[in-house]
């Protein structure tokens, strides 16, 4: 979703701004823009389309200056046009700002501002902030014209503006009359400051900073930062001046490079064995036949008293939660509910004090997941984050948690984060199982299964070329069904989501038997069904469902265990993956489904890493 960058120092600001915006492209956007301050004037360049268009525009007409901010916009209010792109100007070109988030009361404010005589240049909600702030700045009351603190009028104007807004914001603002200063402010939309030598960087996540600095300051809600080349001052809405902690940024710039891969998605699919090893590293305790976690921040006695789990998430992370539900119920015998975070945040479910909430999120910034976590926290439930991005908002706000350690995931379609989340779910199931009735022998057996998993995933990756051929056979189909049962039902949902999001083909995931209750009406010779049918508890049952599809003329692609002849005789195409324990099947089966979506999208000429309308990190409701 929208991205923010900023630079203040002694170099040309646009060098960092353009590079930073390119690094943020993965978040999803449809237009971009920058503003710099050159000889006391604001220089704005904005273009609809890719950052490449912005770069060309800046080559034609360079924007000089060593202070500036930039933005990639993902349209929420008004289409992707030059006018609606950020930055937006306020007053008589006295300030320009970029905004992430949504201003919910912008219509009322806009009406007021129009009556006041403001002329709007865009359809966006964000532009109201620029006009409001300009008005507040012009007020400059006596008590803020303070010689001791030259920033007093600025701070007062920003604070007076922010209190009028409802909604969420991450803001970076430059001012004509403070040409060596950027003001950043946040409420619900992440912002970080990179600390350099005689320069500072602003960004909506750490990725633009990699290679520039490894020192990072995370801005918290209700804080504004006044940033110059040499100083950072942080002011909290209620507490006045507060300090700021400089943390270590744990992104290596080489981790976000494509290397020999054509797309991040493909790179990240192939990174899964390593991601799984990292998720397991140091977390298996063979002496006790259990899992160990460093950051749950609850004692074994407190965890022993947990009687119920609520897992909340969105999208792919929600699918990983469903896998977790099957695992935790089977191995730990603890009831689990999986809730869409966007629903949970507005519900008032009766939960008692023995309920533990886990929020699963790759980015740690998904606004619905954050809101659900806050709501549960407010009601007194202990909250845990299962998160990939270190230092993200959800990771910081949860009472405890577990990092995935999957490495940066840049492709919009989540792949390695999903399998790493499933692995962490299995570790939790093992841990809570061992706190209850899972035997020592069963614990050791699960550990052995998990230790063998990275190598099994490596072998599943060998299906790549074969799946590519299958993809070219079915790439013209416009509807797909994905079917599986038990552990493989969430894998079916995830397979369908992958296909939908990057190839724009309609796909539905269903429990294989449920398909008879409606979706079977879709089956015809142009609607392939992708079955996940490894040997296991429900193997013969799924085969029966597969036969029902064949009997109606539907083509079948089946993901099976290596050497499975029974399904091979029935299906049109089979993809063989290594045999694993039932609870790990969704992980191994997901690999060819990721390839299938990837290669079909390539066949259809889709932009795999930047699918239309999608954002990597969904920071608006
Ligand atoms: O960062 P999160 O895990 O919280 O993101 C949740 C979803 O937005 C995300 O999984 C989305 O569904 C992906 N595009 C799936 O590939």
Image (spheres, rainbow, N blue to C red):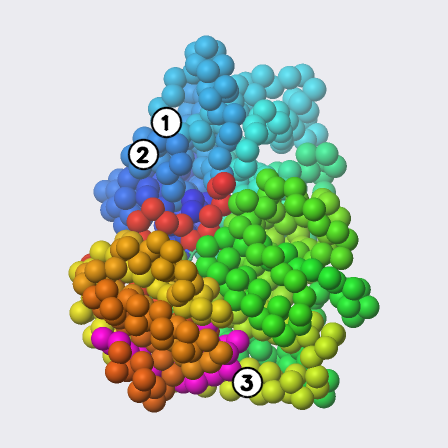
Label number found at residue 123: 1
The residue to which callout 2 is attached is 79
Q: Is residue 356 magenta?
A: no
Q: Is mark 3 within 8 Å of ligand 1?
A: no
- Of badges 2 and 3, the one in the foreground is 3
Residues at discs 1 and 2 in contact (Cβ within 8 Å):
yes
The residue to which callout 3 is attached is 449
Residue 230 can be seen in this image? no
The relative height of residue 129 versus residue 542 in the rendered view (above or below) is above
Give the residues drawn in magenta, as a range. 571-586
Q: Secondary structure at mark 1?
A: loop
Q: CA distance from mark 1 to mark 2?
A: 8 Å
Q: Secondary structure at mark 2?
A: loop
Give the mark nearer the N terminus: 1 vs 2: 2
| Residue 78 x %, y % | 35, 31
| Residue 475 x %, y % | 20, 63
**Are there few (<14), some (14-19), or many (20+) residues within 10 Å of tag 2?**
some
Q: Quadrant of residue 494?
A: bottom left
Q: Residue at x 65, y 85 (%)?
A: 442
| Image position of 270 (left or right of 180) | left
Give the mark nearer the N terminus: 2 vs 3: 2
Give the mark nearer the N terminus: 1 vs 3: 1
């Amino acid at each position: 979703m929208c991205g923010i960058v900023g630079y203040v120092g002694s170099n040309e600001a646009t060098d960092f701004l353009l590079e930073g915006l390119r690094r943020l492209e993965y978040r999803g956007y449809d237009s971009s823009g920058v503003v710099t301050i050159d000889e006391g004037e604001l220089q704005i360049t904005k273009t609809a389309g890719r950052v490449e268009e912005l770069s060309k525009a800046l080559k034609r007409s360079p924007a000089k200056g060593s202070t500036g901010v930039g933005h990639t916009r993902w349209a929420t209010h008004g289409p992707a046009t030059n006018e609606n792109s950020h930055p937006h100007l306020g007053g008589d070109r006295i300030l320009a700002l970029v905004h992430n988030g949504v201003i919910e009361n912008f219509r009322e404010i806009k009406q007021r501002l129009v009556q006041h005589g403001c002329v709007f240049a865009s359809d966006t909600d964000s532009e109201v902030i620029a006009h409001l702030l300009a008005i507040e700045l012009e007020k400059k009351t006596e008590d803020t014209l303070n010689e001791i603190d030259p920033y007093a009028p600025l701070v007062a104007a920003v604070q007076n503006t922010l209190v009028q807004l409802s909604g969420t914001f991450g803001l970076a603002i430059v001012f004509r009359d403070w040409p060596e200063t950027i003001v950043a402010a946040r409420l619900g939309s992440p912002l970080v400051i990179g600390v350099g030598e005689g320069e500072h960087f602003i960004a909506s996540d750490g990725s633009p900073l990699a290679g520039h600095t490894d020192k990072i300051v995370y801005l918290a809600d209700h804080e504004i930062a006044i940033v110059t080349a040499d100083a950072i001052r942080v002011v909290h809405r209620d507490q006045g001046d507060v300090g700021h902690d400089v943390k270590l940024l744990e992104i290596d710039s080489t981790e976000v490079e494509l290397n020999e891969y054509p797309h991040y998605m493909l790179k990240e699919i192939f990174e899964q064995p390593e991601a799984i090893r990292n998720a397991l590293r140091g977390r298996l305790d063979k002496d006790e036949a259990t899992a160990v976690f460093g950051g749950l921040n609850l004692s074994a006695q407190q965890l022993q008293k947990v009687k119920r789990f609520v897992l909340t998430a969105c999208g792919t992370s929600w699918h990983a939660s469903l896998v977790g539900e099957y695992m935790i119920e089977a191995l730990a015998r603890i009831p689990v509910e999986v809730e869409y975070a966007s629903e949970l945040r507005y519900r008032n479910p009766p939960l008692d004090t023995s309920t533990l909430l886990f929020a699963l999120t790759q980015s740690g910034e998904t606004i619905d997941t954050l809101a659900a976590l806050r709501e549960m926290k407010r009601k007194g439930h202990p909250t845990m984050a299962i998160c990939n991005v270190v230092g993200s908002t959800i990771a910081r706000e949860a009472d405890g948690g577990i990092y995935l350690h999957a490495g940066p995931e840049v492709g919009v379609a989540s792949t390695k984060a999903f399998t790493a989340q499933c692995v962490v779910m299995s570790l939790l199931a093992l841990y809570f199982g061992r706190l209850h009735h899972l035997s020592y022998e069963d614990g050791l057996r699960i550990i052995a299964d998990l230790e063998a998993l990275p190598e099994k995933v490596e072998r599943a990756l060998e299906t790549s070329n074969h799946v590519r051929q299958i993809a070219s056979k079915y790439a013209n189909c416009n509807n797909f069904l994905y079917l599986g049962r038990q552990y493989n039902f969430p894998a079916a949902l995830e397979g369908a989501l992958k296909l939908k999001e990057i190839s724009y083909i309609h796909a539905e995931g269903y429990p294989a038997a449920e398909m008879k209750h409606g979706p079977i009406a879709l089956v015809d010779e142009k609607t392939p069904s992708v079955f996940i049918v490894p040997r296991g508890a429900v193997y013969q049952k799924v085969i029966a469902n597969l036969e029902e599809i064949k009997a109606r003329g539907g083509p079948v692609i089946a993901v099976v265990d290596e050497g499975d002849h029974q399904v091979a005789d029935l299906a049109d195409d089979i993809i063989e993956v290594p045999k694993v324990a039932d609870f790990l099947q969704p992980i191994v089966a997901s690999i060819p489904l990721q390839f299938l979506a990837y290669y079909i999208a390539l066949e259809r000429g889709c932009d795999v890493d930047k699918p239309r309308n999608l954002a990597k990190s969904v920071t608006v409701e």
